[in-house]
């Protein structure tokens, strides 16, 4: 298959790109390099720098004819959605509408969309199944949800003259190698690992009792890959999480223990706006539709991530030590 991955130089997109290239697919990567890095793009992928907010950039990537699009490019920071709501709106919503426009013009039969567990907001049901009403509590959650609705409403349009199969993945806290360790706006595990390896205090927002559902990157990629060819997933919205809750305070303790730095300072700062309190995926539906289940125990994924973060830091200090 010829597959376009938007955001394919980023954390999740580049892992998907690597897997698909390894399977022998033709992969086109489009990335604005806002947070993505060219060195993440696997050899063999057709890499184009471009932004989903610019239709001309997308048209270039669609031009060669595609069997499927994995739309992963997005603004991922909740905080930034409040400090720069227009940028969040443009990238996450307008960008998705642009991708949809290209899919229709080029009659691309398959679109997988990177949605987020933040669409649920504060809801009482834990673990949370997909039919739970969505009441996002951050601007980010609103744009991810609106874009998800655009995707599914487009696929259901009665005026389409081709079969447009779409699937949205409501991803939970995806972690693993290549998650940024130097970006305070991207993913708590990467942030904590960067902190401890640079000898900085860890900051916990709020009381640290809030929980998240951490799912390993390879498991997430498994689901994306099997959905590509699974017709039963057309029209579906699927949670991708581990089904387990981890308190942020416990995560901080695990990072400190793994680094042998239990003495490291942990500071507390006020909770941030738009935060969910407890988060836990109900993953029954992805199991039923795709036969998917997360196969990586947290201890194993965590150990691989720590090892990777260490190697990146070592490389960085080796580079810094060069004359
Ligand atoms: C994250 C993603 C979001 C994705 C969602 C679901 C980021 C920035 N956000 O949101 O794009 O859609 O998961 O997968 O990757 N925390 C601290 N100290 C820190 C950093 C964070 O205590 O230094 C806390 C936060 O306040 C929060 C929790 O850790 O309670 C998780 O934060 P974070 O990893 O930023 O992500 P989410 O808000 O869960």
Image: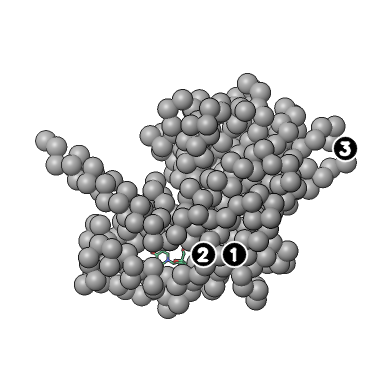
Q: Circles 1 and 2: CB distance less than 8 Å?
A: yes
Pointer 2 residue:
213
Tell me, yes or no, if residue 230 can be seen here: yes
Dot 2 falls on a residue whose secondary structure is: loop
Please state if 311 lies on the left or on the right of 305 as rendered. Answer: left
Q: Residue at x 42, y 78 (%)?
A: 207
Real-space CA distance between mark 3 and mark 1, rounded to the nearest whole angstrom? 35 Å
Residue 215 position in % (x across, y down)? 50, 57
Q: CA distance from mark 2 to mark 3?
A: 39 Å
Name the residue tied to disc 3. 159
Distance between the alpha carbons at the discs numbered 1 and 2: 7 Å
Residue farthest along the left direction in this orientation: 323
Residue positioned most to the top: 64
Residue topped by disc 1: 281
Q: Is residue 238 above or below residue 16?
A: below
x and y, in percent, of residue 74 in the image: 55, 46
Q: Which quadrant of the structure image shows residue 70?
A: top right
Q: Is residue 125 above or below residue 29?
A: below
């Amino acid at each position: 298959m010829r597959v376009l991955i938007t955001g394919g130089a980023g954390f999740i997109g580049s892992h998907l790109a690597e897997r698909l290239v390894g399977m022998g697919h033709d992969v086109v990567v489009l990335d604005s390099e806002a947070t993505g890095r060219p060195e993440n793009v696997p050899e063999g992928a057709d890499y184009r720098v471009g932004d989903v907010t610019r239709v001309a950039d997308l048209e270039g990537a669609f031009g060669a004819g595609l069997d499927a699009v994995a739309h992963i490019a997005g603004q991922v920071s909740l905080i930034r959605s409040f400090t720069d709501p227009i940028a969040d709106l443009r990238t996450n919503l307008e960008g998705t509408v642009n991708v949809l426009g290209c899919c229709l013009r080029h009659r691309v039969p398959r679109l997988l969309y990177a949605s987020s567990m933040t669409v649920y907001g504060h809801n009482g049901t834990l673990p949370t199944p997909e039919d739970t009403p969505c009441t996002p509590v951050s601007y980010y959650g609103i744009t991810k949800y609106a874009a998800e609705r655009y995707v599914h409403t487009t696929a259901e349009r009665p005026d389409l003259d081709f079969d447009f199969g779409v699937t949205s993945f409501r991803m939970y806290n995806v972690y693993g190698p290549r998650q940024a360790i130097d970006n305070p706006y991207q993913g708590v595990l990467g942030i904590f690992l960067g902190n401890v390896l640079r000898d900085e205090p860890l900051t916990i927002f709020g009381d640290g009792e809030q929980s998240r559902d951490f799912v390993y990157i390879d498991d997430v990629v498994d689901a994306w890959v099997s959905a590509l060819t699974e017709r039963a997933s057309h029209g579906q919205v699927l949670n991708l999480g581990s089904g387990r809750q981890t308190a942020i305070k416990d995560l901080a303790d695990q990072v400190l223990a793994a680094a042998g730095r239990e003495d490291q300072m942990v500071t507390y700062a006020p909770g941030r706006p738009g935060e969910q309190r407890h988060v836990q995926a109900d993953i029954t539906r992805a199991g039923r539709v795709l036969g998917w289940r997360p196969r990586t125990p947290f201890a194993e994924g965590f150990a691989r991530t720590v090892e990777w973060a260490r190697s990146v830091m070592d490389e960085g200090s080796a580079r810094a030590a060069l004359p």
